[in-house]
Image (cartoon, grey):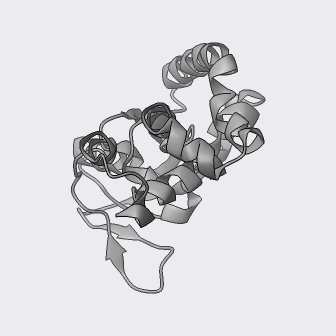
Amino acid sequence: MDIFVLGYAGLSGSLEIYRLKKEDIEKRYPERFLRGLTGITENKGKIEDGLCDLLCEAERKGLISDMEEALEGGVLAALWRLLERNRAGCEYSRRAIPVKQQTVEICEMFGVDPLKLSSEHCFVCLCENARETEAFFGEILKESGFSYIGRTVKGKARKRTDGADTAFLRRPEPDELFKIKTDSTGPAEGR
């Protein structure tokens, strides 16, 4: 089966980091850049409602066989849970997972991995044919992100395919947001 991600990894988590560390972040990045992150909340409800409706419809039509929202532990934890539930291994590309540049920058600033950061309204899905499923979602994908990241394989191995060295998906770890909430020293380079 094909594996795809619908939504942006770490987006809700990076918005929470922004709320918690707004002063530090605004010292480093211009308002124009941050608007790409904070402006998302303006259209958020409309996009999420449309996305959830489409996900349910795609599931009813048999386009999606199973899905997992990337909440606690982010996209990588959701991928692990989805594969466990379906008793499958996978070959996946970490680089193919959609992440907004603002999320990347904020995560780098505080030394956290956006793929291990809570990602409300971001889904890891299994389907028979990712292209057919992508066509079904149509226009809403321009706003929501859609990326084919790999496929399931027999067995339990969860192999990463985009690195020079062989690497495997690890068991879920605590959400990266926990690091921010328990650390009061500021940005990573200030430690």
Image position, residue 36 (x, y; %): 71, 38
Image position, residue 29 (x, y; %): 66, 49
Furthest residue to the bottom?
Answer: 164
In this rendering, the answer to whether 11 lies above or below 45 is below
Return the residue nearer the eye: 146 or 64: 146
Q: How many marks?
A: 0
Image position, residue 130 (x, y; %): 60, 46
Q: Quadrant of residue 168?
A: bottom left
Name which residue lies at 53% across and 50% down.
Answer: 106
Name which residue lies at 78% across and 29% down.
Answer: 139
Residue 11 seen in render: no
Residue 1 seen in render: yes
In this rendering, the answer to whether 21 lies above or below 107 is above
Return the residue nearer the eye: 56 or 111: 111
In this rendering, the answer to whether 86 lies above or below 48 is below
Left or right? Give the position of 56 relative to 30. left
Image position, residue 85 (x, y; %): 24, 41
Question: In the picture, which quadrant includes the C terminus?
Answer: bottom left
Q: Quadrant of residue 155?
A: bottom left
Left or right? Give the position of 188 relative to 34. left
Name which residue lies at 27% across and 42% down.
Answer: 178
Left or right? Give the position of 102 relative to 120. right
